[in-house]
Image: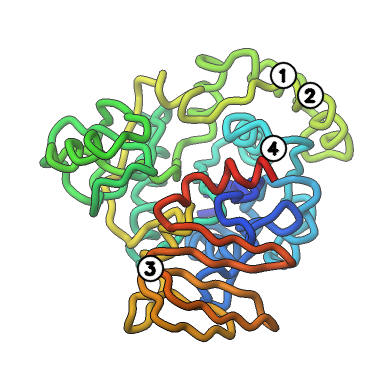
């Protein structure tokens, strides 16, 4: 356990959750589900039984460092790595991996977004432990493993993992045949019917050496940039080096930059009540609802409204009448009213605003 590490990626703003999630206080710090804990706090506690607190690294924007430490007071300030700008997940993971290398060269590492929902944490921890045990074996030291979720519907908002056949057992490490980008509805239905596809959760497990070798093989320019900082990671000179070099990194995800090119790719089919809660629609799926199938938050009076989300901040009163399938959200002097069916356009609307 002492060489088990967790990288929490917490640099995004979750613009699809506007107006709750904004630049000044993004989604990972919110308690959108009303559990009493923020997403990042829940993520930390989910891994804590299998990763010591001193072995966590959170990668985020410098503007969010104090918020991370407020939500995760168990961490030292040097465990929060600050990106000077957003460069997608590959540079984020590379930076954290080089920091871990300066501390523990034989580490095994889990990488997770900060803002996912997991309902069955015992099953989740069992799955992660299986992954750690697999990648620490010498014969699998180069393995790159991602957690696959058994799909419950033809979801168009997730990428998919293709398995060799539909008989791959839950909880058993299996080789990956390929990755599929987010499909349209017809392709998603075909994936479900085929029976050998999983949702790609975006949670990864590998040995430290395995991921560093992969960066050198598939993103050599990025690896060369971070190699220049050897001897600086974990010192007072680290942040200045990162501030100077990070902008030179290619803006690319770990999926496109590494996973799609690797040959030693594996997954663990799992079912532990997972959702990335990436949109208002996914929140609606998991939220408690009233007798008219409305998900309500705040001081609200509903009249003849059905199948809708009404979410207003404390201190605000709302009356909503005559809607069906709508989203009404108010926070910090910002109001959103739209059809739930049109929620995929929220990111575009926010950019225009």
Residue, disc 2: 245
Among the two numbered marks 3 and 4 on one chain, the one whose residue lies closer to the N terminus: 4
| Nearer mark to the viewer, of 3 and 2 | 3
Using a 10 Å C-alpha cutoff, classify the residue at mark 4 as few (fewer than 14 neighbours), some (14 to 19) or many (20 or more).
many
Left or right of 283, for residue 171: left
- The label on residue 225 is 1
Among the two numbered marks 2 and 4 on one chain, the one whose residue lies closer to the N terminus: 4
Residue, disc 4: 99
- Which residue lies at the image location 17% right of the left edge and 36% below the top edge? 190
- The label on residue 324 is 3
- Which residue lies at the image location 44% right of the left edge and 83% below the top edge? 303
Residue 53: % across, % down: 62, 60
* SS category of the residue bearing label 1: helix
Q: Are marks 3 and 4 in contact (CB under 8 Å)?
A: no
Q: Are marks 2 and 1 in contact (CB under 8 Å)?
A: yes
Q: Are marks 3 and 2 in contact (CB under 8 Å)?
A: no
């Amino acid at each position: 356990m002492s060489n088990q590490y967790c990288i929490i990626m917490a640099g995004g703003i979750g613009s699809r959750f506007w107006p709750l999630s904004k630049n000044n206080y993004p989604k990972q710090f919110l308690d959108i589900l009303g559990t009493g804990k923020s997403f990042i706090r829940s993520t930390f506690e989910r891994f804590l039984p299998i990763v010591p607190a001193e072995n966590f690294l959170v990668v985020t924007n410098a503007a969010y460092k104090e918020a991370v430490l407020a939500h995760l007071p168990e961490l030292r300030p040097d465990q929060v790595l600050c990106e000077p700008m957003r460069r997608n997940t590959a540079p984020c993971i590379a930076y954290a991996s080089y920091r871990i290398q300066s501390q523990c060269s034989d580490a095994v590492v889990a990488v997770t977004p900060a803002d996912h929902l997991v309902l069955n944490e015992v099953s989740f921890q069992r799955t992660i432990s299986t992954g750690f045990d697999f990648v620490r074996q010498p014969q699998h030291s180069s393995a790159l493993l991602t957690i696959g979720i058994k799909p419950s519907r033809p979801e168009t908002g997730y990428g998919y993992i293709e398995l060799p056949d539909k008989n791959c057992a839950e909880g058993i490490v299996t080789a990956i045949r390929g990755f599929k980008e987010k499909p349209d509805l017809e392709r998603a239905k075909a994936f479900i019917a085929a029976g050998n596809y999983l949702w790609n959760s975006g949670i990864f497990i590998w040995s430290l050496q395995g991921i560093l070798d992969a960066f050198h093989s598939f993103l050599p320019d990025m690896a060369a940039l971070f190699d220049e900082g050897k001897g600086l990671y974990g010192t007072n000179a680290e942040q200045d080096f990162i501030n100077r070099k990070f902008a030179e990194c290619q803006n690319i995800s770990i999926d496109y930059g590494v996973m799609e090119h690797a040959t030693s790719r594996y997954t663990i089919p799992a079912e532990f009540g997972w959702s990335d809660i990436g949109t208002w629609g996914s929140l609606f799926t998991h939220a408690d609802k009233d007798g008219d199938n409305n998900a309500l938050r705040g001081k609200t009076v509903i009249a003849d409204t059905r199948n809708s989300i009404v979410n207003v901040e404390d201190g605000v009163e709302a009356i909503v009448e005559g809607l069906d399938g709508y989203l009404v959200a108010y926070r910090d002097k910002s109001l959103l009213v739209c059809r739930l069916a049109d929620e995929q356009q929220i990111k575009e609307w926010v950019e225009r605003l």
